[in-house]
Amino acid sequence: MANDGFWRGGDRVEVERVVSGAVVYFPAIVVNEPSVRKNVVWVEHESLVVGGSVRMKEYVIPTHLRPSPPCEPNRRFKSGDEVDVFRYIEGCWVRGKVKKTVLGDSRYIVEFSGENRPETVVGHFNLRLHRDWEDGTWKPSSLPQGNDLEPIHNSTKLKIKLRRREQYEKEAIVEVRSEKEAYKGSCPLRDLVEAKNMRPVPPQQLSSVGRFELGDEVDAWFNKRWWIGSVSKVLGGGSKYLVYLISTGEEQIVPHFNLRTRKDWINGQWVSPSKEECCNPPMKKLKSCETAMKGFSKGMMVEVESDEPGYEGAWYSAKIVRYLGENRYIVEYQTLKTDDEKELLKEVARGSDIRPVPPTLIQRVSRYELDEDVDAWFNDGWWSGRVYEISNDDYTRYVVYFKTTNEALEFEYSDLRPSQVWRKGEWTRGEKGSGLVLK
């Protein structure tokens, strides 16, 4: 990154504006260097979208840009501190002042200048110390002073006992890996840590990414610590992401600026984690609500069950793209497309929601009977239902009832197939099925 007058493509910056009487800062990334003729910089916003999914781009004059301020997730605040608050509804950092500390040091009451912004309670991770960019430097300085930086879980002042020469200087900011119960609290702490569980803080230039993609391995800043995870879904055109946290098995929505590319510290160097595209993932101990199943190979055609409200019970044709571990896969749907209709939709799916393509049935009867379980082709997928009514005497049209949506629709015979259930690695017919032989 250069200075106020020159920016390079990929630089992380902030666009300064005055909104409702207050100075605000929109996080963005430089797309192209300044145009000599126009003296403007082409940037892509990280938190502003148009059309519901596409990140906004615009030309900005260099004097309205500044570098992205230093990240200090462990800074503590006190009453009277000038701070910036990230407001999701506006997609920007808004200047304010800490009025009061609540719930220890995890939440603060912040008041704003200008109009239409009443004081509000803000979580620690949505705050940063306000700084001005003047003459190529940050004011106040970004260097730690006194006890303003009070370390917590991932950057703790440590007493280090080593039989060999110390690897870290006193007061060095490091990251600590631990599953101790003590680290789950919100208060800063001191601890004795083995050197193998420590590493330096990753340099920002190694982890800065303009946009994360489905399946990317990341570290997510959540609940005052960095969690290892992977991107399950891109939201808001890349302004935020649904991230699967490996250690907890949960998914959390995380804004772009609270993510970094995952890096491992090995033999004194930062390296990218190996991506094992396991074609035959091993069997693993699953949660009680999941069903053990055979691993699915890369490129294998499967069907994926929807769990979205209103679409329960629908199965969509898909292809296995990659195994992510933890019984999760990236799949590419064959009948569903992205919002812009340009590409096939990719998503992360649980292994318990995936099954092989059902086999064809031999000795298949030429008609379906009342109350027989069937799958109906509707809205680009197979929906499980039951024959509710036979519409004509030649058995070419049927009314099918869908329990999940509580509706009945009419279908041609050609748009139906016998319903089959994938259970414990074998195909069976539904309870009302006729017991036909499976091929």
Image (cartoon, rainbow, N blue to C red):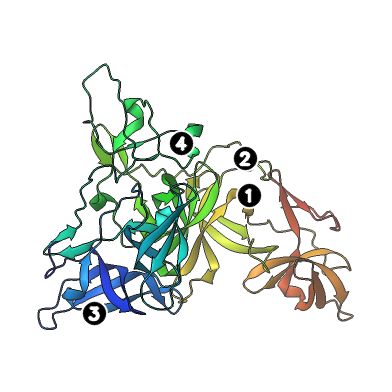
Question: Sequence-wise, which precedes: disc 4 or disc 3?
Answer: 3
Q: Is residue 239 visible?
A: no
Gap in Å between the C-alphas at discs 2 and 4?
26 Å
Q: Nearer the viewer, mark 4 or mark 3?
A: 4
Quick one: which residue is furthest to the top in this view?
163
What residue is shown at x 86% (from left), y 79% (from top)? Answer: 394
Compared with 189, 359 (above or below) is: below
Q: Secondary structure at mark 3?
A: strand
Q: Does the residue at mark 1 contact the one at mark 2 (Cβ under 8 Å)?
A: yes
- Check disc 1: other Cα within 10 Å, few if <14, some if 14-19, many if 20+: some
Residue wearing tag 1: 352
- Check disc 3: other Cα within 10 Å, few if <14, some if 14-19, many if 20+: some
- Check disc 2: other Cα within 10 Å, few if <14, some if 14-19, many if 20+: some
Q: Secondary structure at mark 1?
A: helix
| Residue 56 figure quarter | bottom left
Q: Amino acid at mark 2?
A: Leu
Q: Nearer the viewer, mark 1 or mark 3?
A: 3
Residue wearing tag 4: 183
Q: Amino acid at mark 3?
A: Tyr
Q: Residue 282 at what x, y percent from top left?
A: 54, 37
Gap in Å between the C-alphas at discs 1 and 4?
32 Å
| Residue 308 figure quarter | bottom right
Gap in Å between the C-alphas at discs 1 and 2?
9 Å
Q: Quadrant of the N terminus?
A: bottom left
Question: Sequence-wise, which precedes: disc 1 or disc 2?
Answer: 2
Q: Amino acid at mark 1?
A: Ser
Instruction: Work out whether residue 429 or residue 43 is closer to the camera in this orientation and state it.
Output: 43
Residue wearing tag 2: 286
Q: Does the residue at mark 1 contact the one at mark 3 (Cβ under 8 Å)?
A: no
Q: Amino acid at mark 4?
A: Tyr
Question: Sequence-wise, which precedes: disc 1 or disc 3?
Answer: 3
